[in-house]
Image: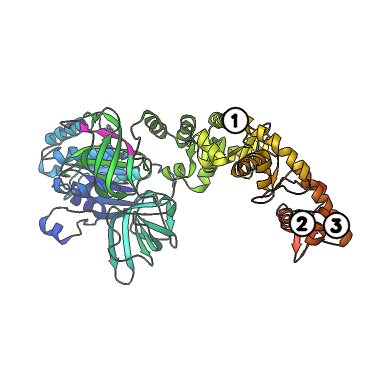
């Protein structure tokens, strides 16, 4: 278990940690010279249950609150230290607020320096602490009067911390994430990073990523709770000795993450639920500049208030936090906001969506989605999103947002998601709604375009609406094709019952051209001859025949050659008979028997190749399948 101290400067936090562990947590020469904790210190001691208690000693001076926040991130229990002579002081209150905003699970309070005051003063300070804790979420925390120099009360406090260590810990859920609070190089070993494990577990040899930089690394060694180990897990402080071909000295800093690749997803916009401290003098307004403390990071940012334009002291609301540079965050991460000068703690909150959109962030439908994402547990959140979002839920994004490992993600999806289209999940109701829209769009298209055989798949998707993801649209079309509702051919989609019809002006032209085809049979009439006899422009005739080929009136054999389907059937039977008699089909024999010119008969033979009726071998062709089995309209 990880325990962090908290409290005002000079209230004896470091001395108390030494009394509990035997370790002086002040590690910097300047700290020892000034007698004041400046940065994070660490100490460890065996717990009664055989585990290890890890202590993070944080600075109490107001100048170093940013370091204090980095130290209390990811802890299980806080040890709030209040000196008996001073009682609660400004940093006592600020540290208490920070612990509450970060959602620290439990707290034990120590009243230090009792050897310097009378018993009545200790009772007064106890009453002041109880009043301070009221309404903080830590009401009822055990309070222990102690003296670090004499040891009075220290065993009782130690017993309380041992009992806290025996409380059930959270499951080792999720992919591994470690919030880096220190990074340094050890001669002969290489880069070492330390921090609190936020989720998951890691073992020696595991590949990880530095985030947000994206540098791949591998774990060479692990110290968990100050002991050499093969693994580290949620609820521990650990040091990782890491290596990587792209890793150089200075590449990793406080505020970075070491994590599993599936949750490496840098972001600069997070949607969150923000709570403003009651003691603030003014509301937080839209686009307020702040310092964001998340994990061990301290990053300048802006707050976009999504409802009402401001959030009053003591109130809460939905916000989007826009950072100056990329950070790592996942749903459920707690954070602190301090003012632009990083002097005052203003608010804190919980990440809802770490991959927030830049546009439409305050639209009612977006706010509804955020409220769904706030739901607990994960099953309820996913179910709510499926019901709310008609455009489907991006499953990969949801899994990453919630930090689900593949096994848990698969079980969740199988349990909750009734319909999947590509990477998107849908409720049964929304899926049926989209299928109905596809049917309606096809019917409307056929009504307005009677001469069209069908509509291109991309065009139909546009008619239905881009809110439907492409992969889901493709799957829905496949489902409609399987159940016999639509026919898909050559990337064209139509309702099965649809039969294309010529437009009135095309019907008039066809009445002039059809007799020409019949008179020339089996020869293909030239475009020029048809234009002359019909009294029409040659280009208009060509464009009409292309349209007519789409609805089956004629077959486009080549760019300028058109024949009726019945004529192709006759020529196919003729080719089959020639091949049967001669052993193969030649252009000369085909030309002589059909009476069609050489160039035209070559175009017919090549069309037969394309539709799979014949296969060419040098100057001869073999029949691949019986003529009666051939679709003569085929493909060009």
The Cα atoms of the two marked residues, 2 and 3, are separated by: 13 Å
Judge left or right: residue 251 versus residue 82. right
* Residue furthest right as drawn: 581
Out of 218 and 37, give the one closest to the viewer.
218
Out of 189 and 423, give the one closest to the viewer.
423
Q: Are marks 2 and 3 in contact (CB under 8 Å)?
A: no
Is residue 627 visible to us here? yes
Q: Are marks 3 and 1 in contact (CB under 8 Å)?
A: no
Secondary element type, mark 2: strand
Q: Which mark is residue 614?
A: 2
**Residue 418, percent across and down?**
57, 35
Q: Which mark is residue 439?
A: 1
Coloring scheme of the render? Answer: rainbow
For marks 1 and 2 on the same chain, the one whose residue lies earlier in the sequence: 1
Residue at the spot of label 3: 578
* Magenta residues (range): 271-286
The Cα atoms of the two marked residues, 1 and 2, are separated by: 38 Å
């Amino acid at each position: 278990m990880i325990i962090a101290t908290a409290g005002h400067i000079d209230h004896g936090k470091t001395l108390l940690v030494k009394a509990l562990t035997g370790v002086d947590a002040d590690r910097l020469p300047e700290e020892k010279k000034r007698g004041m904790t400046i940065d994070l210190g660490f100490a460890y001691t065996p717990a009664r249950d055989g585990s290890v208690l890890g202590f993070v000693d944080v600075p109490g001076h107001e100048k170093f609150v940013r370091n204090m926040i980095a130290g209390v991130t990811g802890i299980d229990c806080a040890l709030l230290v209040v000196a008996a002579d001073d009682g609660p002081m400004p940093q006592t209150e600020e540290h208490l607020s920070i612990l509450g905003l970060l959602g620290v699970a439990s707290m034990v309070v120590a009243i230090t320096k009792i050897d310097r005051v009378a018993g009545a003063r200790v009772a007064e300070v106890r009453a002041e602490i109880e009043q301070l804790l009221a309404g903080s979420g830590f009401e009822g925390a055990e309070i222990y009067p102690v003296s670090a120099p004499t040891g009075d009360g220290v065993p009782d406090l130690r017993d309380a911390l041992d009992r806290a260590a025996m409380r059930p810990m959270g499951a080792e859920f999720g992919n591994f994430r470690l919030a880096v609070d220190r990074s340094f190089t050890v001669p002969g070993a290489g880069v070492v990073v330390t921090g609190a494990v936020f989720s998951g577990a890691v073992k020696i040899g595991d590949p990880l990523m530095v985030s947000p930089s994206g540098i791949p690394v591998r774990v060479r060694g692990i110290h968990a709770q100050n002991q050499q180990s093969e693994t580290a897990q949620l609820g521990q402080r650990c040091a990782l000795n890491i290596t990587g071909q792209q890793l150089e000295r200075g590449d990793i800093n406080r505020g970075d993450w070491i994590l599993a690749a599936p949750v490496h997803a840098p972001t600069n916009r997070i949607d969150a639920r923000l709570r403003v401290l009651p003691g603030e003098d003014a509301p937080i307004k839209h686009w307020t500049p702040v310092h964001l403390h998340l994990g061990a990071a301290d990053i300048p940012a802006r707050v976009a208030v999504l409802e009402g334009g401001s959030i009053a002291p003591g109130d809460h609301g939905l916000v989007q936090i826009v950072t100056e540079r990329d950070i790592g965050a996942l749903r459920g991460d707690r954070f602190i906001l301090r003012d632009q000068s990083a002097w005052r703690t203003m608010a804190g909150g919980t990440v809802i969506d770490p991959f927030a959109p830049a546009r439409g962030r305050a639209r009612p439908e977006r706010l509804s989605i955020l409220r769904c994402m706030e739901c607990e547990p994960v099953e309820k959140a996913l179910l709510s999103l499926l019901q709310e979002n008609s455009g489907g839920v991006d499953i990969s994004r949801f899994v990453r947002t919630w930090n689900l490992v593949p096994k848990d993600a698969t079980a969740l999806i199988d349990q909750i998601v009734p319909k999947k289209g590509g990477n998107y999940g849908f409720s049964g109701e929304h899926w049926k709604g989209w299928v109905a829209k596809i049917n309606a769009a096809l019917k409307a298209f056929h009504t307005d375009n009677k001469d069209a055989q069908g509509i291109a798949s991309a065009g139909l998707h546009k008619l239905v609406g881009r809110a439907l993801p492409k992969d889901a649209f493709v799957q829905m079309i496949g489902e409609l094709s399987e159940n016999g509702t639509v026919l898909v051919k050559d990337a064209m989609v139509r309702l099965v019952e649809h039969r294309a019809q010529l437009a009135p002006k095309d019907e008039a032209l066809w009445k002039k051209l059809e007799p020409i085809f019949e008179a020339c049979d089996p020869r293909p009439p030239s475009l020029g001859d048809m234009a002359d006899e019909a009294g029409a422009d040659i280009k208009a005739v060509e464009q009409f025949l292309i349209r007519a080929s789409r609805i089956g009136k004629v077959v486009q054999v080549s760019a300028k050659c058109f024949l009726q389907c019945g004529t192709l059937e006759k020529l196919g039977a003729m080719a089959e008979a020639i091949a049967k008699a001669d052993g193969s089909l030649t252009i000369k024999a085909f030309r002589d028997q059909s009476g069609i010119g050489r160039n035209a008969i070559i175009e017919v033979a090549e069309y037969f190749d394309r539709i799979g009726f014949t296969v060419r071998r040098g100057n001869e062709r073999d029949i691949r399948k019986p003529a009666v089995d051939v679709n003569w309209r085929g493909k060009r």
